[in-house]
Image (tube, helix red, strand yellow):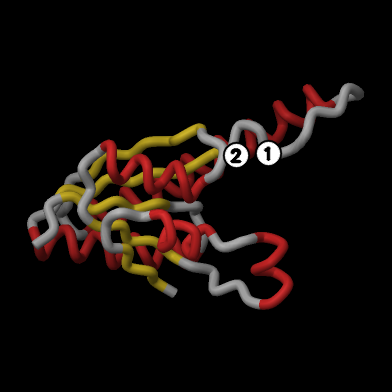
Amino acid sequence: MFKKILLPTDGSETARRAALVAADMAGRYGAALEIVSVIDPLPFVYFPDGSTEAMALYLEAAESAAKLGLVAAEAAAKAAGVACVSHILREHGPAQAITEHALSSGCDLIVMGSHGRRGLDAVILGSVAQKVLTLAKVPVLVVK
Protein backbone atom coordinates (compact mmCIF):
# COMPACT_ATOMS: atom_id res chain seq x y z
CA MET A 1 0.00 0.00 0.00
CA PHE A 2 2.69 2.53 1.01
CA LYS A 3 6.16 2.45 -0.48
CA LYS A 4 7.83 5.43 1.18
CA ILE A 5 6.76 7.08 4.43
CA LEU A 6 7.93 10.53 5.52
CA LEU A 7 8.31 11.11 9.25
CA PRO A 8 8.91 14.73 10.27
CA THR A 9 10.24 15.04 13.81
CA ASP A 10 10.88 17.87 16.23
CA GLY A 11 12.09 15.57 18.99
CA SER A 12 8.94 16.05 21.09
CA GLU A 13 7.00 13.30 22.84
CA THR A 14 4.31 13.38 20.15
CA ALA A 15 7.00 13.07 17.47
CA ARG A 16 8.37 10.01 19.31
CA ARG A 17 4.90 8.43 19.31
CA ALA A 18 4.58 9.22 15.60
CA ALA A 19 7.98 7.57 15.03
CA LEU A 20 6.71 4.34 16.60
CA VAL A 21 3.61 4.40 14.37
CA ALA A 22 5.60 5.24 11.22
CA ALA A 23 8.19 2.54 11.91
CA ASP A 24 5.46 -0.03 12.57
CA MET A 25 3.65 0.91 9.35
CA ALA A 26 6.87 0.83 7.33
CA GLY A 27 7.58 -2.65 8.67
CA ARG A 28 4.07 -3.91 7.93
CA TYR A 29 4.01 -2.54 4.38
CA GLY A 30 7.68 -3.09 3.54
CA ALA A 31 7.99 0.64 3.01
CA ALA A 32 11.07 2.81 3.17
CA LEU A 33 11.14 5.34 6.02
CA GLU A 34 12.46 8.84 5.49
CA ILE A 35 12.94 11.01 8.58
CA VAL A 36 13.30 14.79 8.50
CA SER A 37 13.78 17.55 11.01
CA VAL A 38 13.33 21.15 9.89
CA ILE A 39 15.45 24.02 11.15
CA ASP A 40 14.31 27.53 10.29
CA PRO A 41 17.60 29.32 9.48
CA LEU A 42 15.99 32.76 9.86
CA PRO A 43 13.67 32.48 12.85
CA PHE A 44 13.74 36.14 13.83
CA VAL A 45 14.42 39.54 12.39
CA TYR A 46 17.98 40.81 12.32
CA PHE A 47 18.90 43.27 15.05
CA PRO A 48 22.28 44.97 14.65
CA ASP A 49 23.47 44.80 18.26
CA GLY A 50 24.56 41.30 19.24
CA SER A 51 22.20 39.42 16.97
CA THR A 52 25.02 37.50 15.32
CA GLU A 53 25.76 35.90 18.66
CA ALA A 54 22.08 35.19 19.31
CA MET A 55 21.70 33.68 15.84
CA ALA A 56 24.75 31.45 16.34
CA LEU A 57 23.38 30.24 19.68
CA TYR A 58 19.97 29.58 18.15
CA LEU A 59 21.43 27.64 15.21
CA GLU A 60 23.64 25.57 17.51
CA ALA A 61 20.69 24.69 19.76
CA ALA A 62 18.41 24.00 16.78
CA GLU A 63 20.98 21.73 15.15
CA SER A 64 21.47 19.82 18.40
CA ALA A 65 17.71 19.41 18.94
CA ALA A 66 17.24 18.27 15.34
CA LYS A 67 19.95 15.63 15.69
CA LEU A 68 18.44 14.34 18.95
CA GLY A 69 15.03 14.08 17.27
CA LEU A 70 16.52 12.17 14.36
CA VAL A 71 18.39 9.80 16.67
CA ALA A 72 15.18 8.99 18.57
CA ALA A 73 13.26 8.36 15.34
CA GLU A 74 16.10 6.25 13.94
CA ALA A 75 16.02 4.14 17.12
CA ALA A 76 12.30 3.49 16.60
CA ALA A 77 13.00 2.42 13.01
CA LYS A 78 15.84 0.15 14.11
CA ALA A 79 13.68 -1.46 16.81
CA ALA A 80 11.05 -2.22 14.14
CA GLY A 81 13.68 -3.60 11.78
CA VAL A 82 13.11 -0.83 9.25
CA ALA A 83 15.86 0.85 7.29
CA CYS A 84 15.67 4.63 7.22
CA VAL A 85 17.29 7.73 5.80
CA SER A 86 17.48 10.96 7.81
CA HIS A 87 17.82 14.59 6.76
CA ILE A 88 18.00 17.97 8.42
CA LEU A 89 16.18 20.50 6.26
CA ARG A 90 17.20 24.12 6.62
CA GLU A 91 14.16 25.95 5.32
CA HIS A 92 11.93 28.80 6.40
CA GLY A 93 8.48 27.40 7.14
CA PRO A 94 8.51 23.80 8.38
CA ALA A 95 5.12 22.82 6.89
CA GLN A 96 6.11 23.88 3.40
CA ALA A 97 9.53 22.22 3.75
CA ILE A 98 7.87 18.97 4.86
CA THR A 99 5.31 18.89 2.06
CA GLU A 100 7.86 19.85 -0.60
CA HIS A 101 10.25 17.17 0.66
CA ALA A 102 7.45 14.59 0.55
CA LEU A 103 6.86 15.40 -3.12
CA SER A 104 10.51 15.65 -4.17
CA SER A 105 11.43 12.35 -2.47
CA GLY A 106 8.43 10.41 -3.73
CA CYS A 107 6.85 9.80 -0.34
CA ASP A 108 3.28 8.53 -0.49
CA LEU A 109 2.39 9.07 3.19
CA ILE A 110 3.37 11.56 5.90
CA VAL A 111 3.13 10.38 9.52
CA MET A 112 3.62 13.14 12.06
CA GLY A 113 2.85 14.09 15.63
CA SER A 114 0.65 16.94 16.72
CA HIS A 115 0.90 18.82 19.98
CA GLY A 116 -2.83 19.46 19.83
CA ARG A 117 -2.49 23.15 20.58
CA ARG A 118 -5.74 24.99 21.04
CA GLY A 119 -6.94 28.49 21.66
CA LEU A 120 -4.37 31.24 21.93
CA ASP A 121 -1.41 28.81 21.73
CA ALA A 122 -2.64 27.62 18.34
CA VAL A 123 -3.07 31.20 17.13
CA ILE A 124 0.34 32.38 18.37
CA LEU A 125 2.44 29.26 17.78
CA GLY A 126 0.52 27.88 14.83
CA SER A 127 0.12 24.24 14.06
CA VAL A 128 2.63 22.66 11.75
CA ALA A 129 0.43 19.56 11.50
CA GLN A 130 -2.57 21.66 10.46
CA LYS A 131 -0.51 23.44 7.81
CA VAL A 132 0.87 20.14 6.51
CA LEU A 133 -2.69 18.78 6.27
CA THR A 134 -3.61 21.83 4.20
CA LEU A 135 -0.56 21.79 1.91
CA ALA A 136 0.13 18.07 1.46
CA LYS A 137 -0.52 16.34 -1.85
CA VAL A 138 -0.28 12.92 -0.15
CA PRO A 139 -2.20 11.42 2.79
CA VAL A 140 -1.19 12.60 6.26
CA LEU A 141 -1.60 10.53 9.42
CA VAL A 142 -1.52 12.70 12.53
CA VAL A 143 -0.55 11.03 15.81
CA LYS A 144 -1.53 12.69 19.09
What's the residue type where badge 2 is placed?
Ala
Tag 2 residue: 62
SS at badge 1 = loop
What's the distance in space between the residues labelled 2 and 1, CA to CA? 10 Å
Which residue shows up at 19% across the image and 64% down it? 25
- Image coordinates of residue 128 in percent, x first then y, are 52, 58
- Image coordinates of residue 131 in percent, x first then y, are 49, 59
What's the residue type where badge 1 is placed?
Pro
Quadrant of the rendering where the C terminus is positioned: bottom left
Tag 1 residue: 43
Looking at the image, residue 103 sits to the left or right of residue 80; the answer is right
In the foreground, 14 or 94: 94
Q: Are marks 2 and 1 in contact (CB under 8 Å)?
A: yes
In the foreground, 9 or 13: 9
Crowding near pointer 1: few (<14 within 10 Å), some, many (20+)?
few
Crowding near pointer 2: few (<14 within 10 Å), some, many (20+)?
some
Looking at the image, residue 123 sits to the left or right of residue 137; the answer is right
Quadrant of the rendering where the N terminus is positioned: bottom left
Q: Please tell me how many numbered marks the rendered image carries.
A: 2
In the foreground, 114 or 15: 114
Which residue shows up at 33% across the image and 39% down it? 86
Is 72 placed above or below 117 here?
A: above
SS at badge 2 = helix
- Image coordinates of residue 140 in percent, x first then y, are 32, 63
Q: Nearer the viewer, mark 2 or mark 1?
A: 1
Which residue shows up at 52% across the image and 60% down it? 12
Picture quadrant of residue 40: top right
- Image coordinates of residue 114 in percent, x first then y, are 48, 67
Q: Give whichever of discs 2 and 1 has the lower sequence position.
A: 1
Which residue shows up at 10% across the image and 65% down it? 28
